[in-house]
Amino acid sequence: MLSRHAAACGISIGLLTGIAIAMFLDLEVADAAYRIAVLAVGGAWMGILLAYLNDLLPSPQNQNSEHWK
C-alpha cells in the first residue's frame, strides 16, 4: 500500500471517529473541530507509519524456505 493511500485511510478513520465522539459528547463546534483535526492528523500519521513498517518487514515469499521447515 502506498503511503498516501494509508494516510488517506487514516485521515478518514480519524475524521469519522472524531465526528462520532463530538456527536456523542455533544461538544461545541470549536472543541469538536479541534478534536476532529487532532484525530485526523494522528490517523494519517499512524497510516504512514504502518505503511512504512509494511515496506520494511520482509514478506514470506522473500525469506529462505528452509528456514520455515
Image (cartoon, helix red, strand yellow):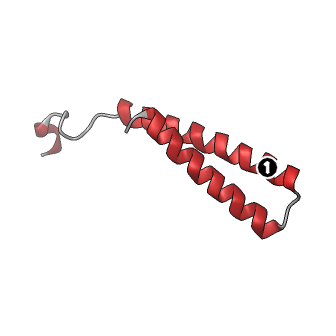
Residue in the picture at 12% in, 39% down: 65
Residue in the picture at 60% in, 45% down: 43
Mark 1, Cα crowd under 10 Å, few <14 / some 14-19 / many 20+, is some
**Taking 58 as reference, is 38 left or right?**
right
Q: Amino acid at mark 1?
A: Ala
Residue in the picture at 88% in, 58% down: 28
Check disc 1 and report the residue beneath it.
33
Residue 15, image x, y percentages:
65, 52
Residue sitting at the far bottom: 24
> 46 or 8, which is in the foreground?
8
Residue in the picture at 15% in, 34% down: 64
Please determine whether, in this image, residue 29 is positioned above or below residue 48. below
**Taking 65 as reference, is 60 left or right?**
right
Q: Residue 62's quadrant in the figure?
A: top left
> 19 or 63, which is in the foreground?
19
**Taking 38 as reference, is 8 left or right?**
left
Residue 5, image x, y percentages:
45, 39
Quadrant position of the N terminus in the picture: top left
Q: Residue 23's quadrant in the figure?
A: bottom right
Residue sitting at the far front: 29
- At mark 1, the secondary structure is helix
Residue 25, image x, y percentages:
81, 67
Please determine whether, in this image, residue 50 is positioned above or below residue 22. above
Residue 7, image x, y percentages:
52, 39
> 6 or 58, which is in the foreground?
6
Please determine whether, in this image, residue 59 is positioned above or below residue 31. above
Please determine whether, in this image, residue 23 is positioned above or below residue 7. below
